[in-house]
Image (cartoon, rainbow, N blue to C red):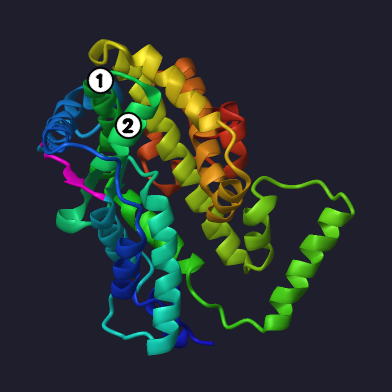
């Protein structure tokens, strides 16, 4: 199948329908008075600006760029923004309309997934949003988590902004990151035109290897393992690129949050301890299944593994030399280097 006739996932989904269904299915936020809602919206908007300068100082990135406020949204607004971003990321913006029935079916499925995720997202930097990128903070979720953790609200709100603003700084200081992510997504979401029997054969081989106890390579277990089993080799490389990039970005943000936190967030020690305990808390069986299917637990491991990588490199060579990592795709860590940071230091520095 030629490249011109390939179909991307983005053009198989009715994204407007996904946004509509997702917004309808989203759980309502926690009960709050108008005063509380207005207060958290104002504080998050202010904190998204206050966090920028200390983040820049610690990272050494994005010096002199304008500081902008985040957009503070509720769950349905986040779903609509995420749907639009996914439409752009997956190539669904060229004017082609999806098949009506298939587009509605996949749109409803996507909307349901976004509705589930929407209650757990505190914030997100969207590099494909308006004006070349947009930081979103989901205020009902911030209220819910700070109540659950029983922490000082103003401190927690600033702490959340330190993490999310780091993502904004990462992408604005390094515009090539968005294109690198987009290129990998294009490969990952493109139908290859392979014979179904080839995909089934790879899946059967995967199952046989697991049964026979063949040693697993990184990212070869669970849902990611099944996904990799049916992918072509270019798609596997693209998935690895996205996983490594996500691990680096999240780990870097967690490192920066901890580096900045003690100076600007008085109760940062309590917040970090209780937040980490919350991440590790055992979930009900159905929620554990959904989290596994949606890759949420894999996302959690990104924070831990990525932060360990960044902590090690910065401790060994300092932040200025660590920033070599942002030079281009060739200086990003390889999958095995995430687990062994010294290998990245030896290869790149």
In the displayed structure image, the side of residue 72 where residue 255 appears, left or right: right
Residue at 30% over, 67% down: 19
Q: Residue 177's x, y, as percent?
A: 34, 49
Residue at 70% over, 50% down: 221
Q: Label the magenta part by its dominant secondary structure.
A: loop
Residue at 23% over, 43% down: 172
Within 10 Å of disc 2 (Cα), the crowding (few <14, some 14-19, many 20+) is many
Residue at 41% over, 72% down: 108
Q: Is residue 46 above or below residue 258?
A: below
Q: Nearer the viewer, residue 254 or 292?
A: 292
Q: Nearer the viewer, mark 1 or mark 2?
A: 1
Q: Residue 229's x, y, as percent?
A: 69, 63
Tell whether position 68 is magenta: yes
Task: State the mark number for residue 155.
Answer: 1
What is the residue that sits farthest to the right in this orientation? 212
First along the sequence among labels 1 and 2:
1
Residue 273 visible? The answer is yes
Task: State the mark number for residue 22.
Answer: none
Q: Secondary structure at mark 1?
A: helix
In the displayed structure image, the side of residue 18 where residue 246 appears, left or right: right
In the displayed structure image, the side of residue 80 where residue 106 appears, left or right: right
Span colored in magenta: 67-74
How many tags in the picture?
Answer: 2
The reply to whether the C-beta atoms of the residues labelled 1 and 2 are less than 8 Å apart is no
Q: Which residue is mark 2?
A: 163
Q: Secondary structure at mark 2?
A: helix
Label 1 and label 2: CA atoms lie apart by 13 Å
């Amino acid at each position: 199948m030629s490249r011109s006739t390939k179909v991307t996932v983005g053009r198989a989904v009715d994204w407007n329908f996904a946004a509509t269904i997702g917004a309808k299915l989203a759980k309502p936020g926690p009960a709050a008075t108008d005063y509380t809602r207005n207060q958290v919206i104002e504080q998050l908007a202010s904190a998204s600006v206050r966090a920028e300068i200390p983040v820049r100082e610690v990272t050494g990135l994005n010096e002199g760029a304008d500081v902008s406020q985040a957009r503070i949204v509720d769950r349905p607004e986040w779903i609509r923004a995420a749907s639009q971003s996914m439409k752009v990321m997956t190539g669904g913006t060229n004017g082609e309309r999806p098949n009506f029935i298939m587009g509605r079916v996949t749109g409803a499925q996507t909307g349901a997934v976004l509705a589930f995720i929407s209650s757990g997202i505190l914030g997100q930097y969207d590099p494909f949003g308006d004006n070349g990128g947009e930081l979103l903070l989901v205020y009902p979720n911030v209220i819910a988590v700070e109540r659950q953790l029983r922490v000082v609200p103003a401190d927690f709100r600033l702490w959340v902004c330190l993490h999310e603003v780091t993502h904004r700084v990462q992408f604005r200081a390094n515009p090539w990151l968005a294109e690198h992510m987009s290129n990998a997504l294009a490969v990952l979401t493109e139908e290859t035109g392979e014979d179904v029997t080839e995909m089934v054969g790879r899946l059967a081989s995967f199952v046989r290897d697991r049964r026979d106890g063949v040693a697993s390579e990184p990212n070869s277990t669970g849902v990611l393992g099944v996904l990799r089993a049916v992918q072509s080799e270019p798609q596997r490389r693209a998935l690895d690129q996205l996983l490594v990039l996500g691990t680096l970005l999240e780990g870097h943000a967690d490192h920066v949050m901890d580096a900045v936190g003690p100076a600007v967030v008085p109760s940062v020690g309590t917040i970090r301890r209780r937040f980490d305990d919350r991440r590790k808390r055992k979930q009900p069986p159905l929620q554990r299944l959904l989290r596994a299917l949606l890759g949420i637990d894999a996302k959690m491991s990104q924070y831990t593994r990525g932060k360990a990588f960044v902590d090690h490199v910065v401790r060994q060579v300092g932040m200025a030399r660590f920033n070599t990592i942002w030079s281009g795709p060739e200086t990003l860590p390889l999958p095995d280097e995430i687990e062994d940071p010294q290998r990245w230091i030896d290869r790149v520095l």
